[in-house]
Amino acid sequence: MSFPWAVSYRDAAPDPFWGEPTSAVNFCEEDYIITKYIGEFFNTLTSLLYIAYGIHGIRRFRRQGAGSFENTSLSYWALIGVGIFSGLYHTTLKYHTQMSDELSMHLAIGTVLQQTWCFQEPPKIQRRNTAIILGILVPFVIYHCVTDEFVLHVLLFFCMCWIVAYRVRYIIHIRIKEREHRQRLRSLLTFASMTALTSYGIWNIDVNFCSTLTTWKRQLGMPLGILLELHGWWHIGTAVAAYTFMSIIEFLVSPEDLESHGVGFAWPAKAILQDLAPKAVMNGNANGHTKGE
């Protein structure tokens, strides 16, 4: 099936500007098919969404009068890192940029783990939990760089995501008094979780049915073939999910008396958090420390 207005894909890619790919993992988008300067054009383009969400989060912090490097803002910096290293990987298709992409994902989820498991805990428990997180991530980083064992990378990442989701639900339970508000925050958390799981399903289709997808893309031509660049949709879905998780966590751990509390978040967190901000009744001290510290 073809359309008279469709642009056909090239029969062969030009010689790559960055040299032959050396990455151990190569996704379904045809290499250098758009330009010799970018290995996977649409995968690179969609990586920018991580950066956009991260910049929005940091700019929101600055509008609150908080420093750009406060503990809660570190997750947004990590999200920017995911976008940068993902873009570099899909641009160059080199092994070292693949490693930086994969390890940036663990750094991002590690910052969120640290925030949620150290929130309102005594300093001794904060140090213990931080040491546990580092004790898992640092040996894994070394092992992964040496062996490039991809299955463990995926399993560890999704286990940490599940632990974050579990902890955030617990914080919602102990922090938000009104049942309706708890339900709305949980619904937003569920949306983020389902978006992440759906994105993972799309990622698997891209990996396991690449030849079929490539045939369909070439039959459709551009721009419709772009819709079948499923790894790019993985980027979009996980960027939305990650930002939503980070927004919920920031909302829960930030001081309630800030004028901008709940205000200025981006979609999809914006509507719910902005609506709850003037009404949410928090238990305890909202600055991230236990009473008496």
Image (cartoon, rainbow, N blue to C red):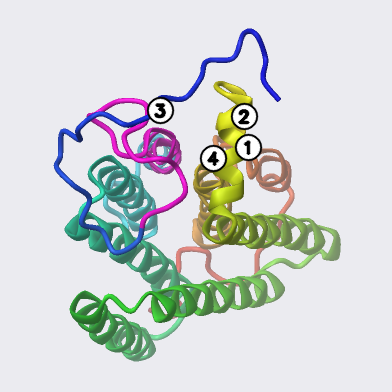
Q: Identify the mark nearer the N-term, 3 or 1.
A: 3
Instruction: Identify residue type, mark 2.
Output: Gln
Q: Residue at x 62, y 8 (%)?
A: 5
For label 3, the residue is 11
Gap between marks 1 and 4 measured at Cα? 11 Å
**Residue 229, label in figure:** 4
Q: How many labels does the image show?
A: 4
- State left or right for residue 259 relative to residue 124: right
Q: Which of 44 and 186 is in front in this view?
A: 44
Q: Residue furthest front?
A: 11
Contact? badges 1 and 2 (CB < 8 Å) = yes
Dot in front, 4 or 2: 2
User: Gap between marks 2 and 3, in whole Å?
Assistant: 12 Å
Residue 257 is left or right of residue 38, and the answer is right
**Mark with earlier residue (1, 4):** 1
Give the numbered dot on residue 216. Answer: 1
Amino acid type, mark 4: Glu
Label 4 close to label 2 by CB (< 8 Å): no
Q: Is residue 42 magenta?
A: yes
Residue 91 is drawn in which quadrant? Answer: top left
Q: Give the range drawn in magenta.
A: 26-54
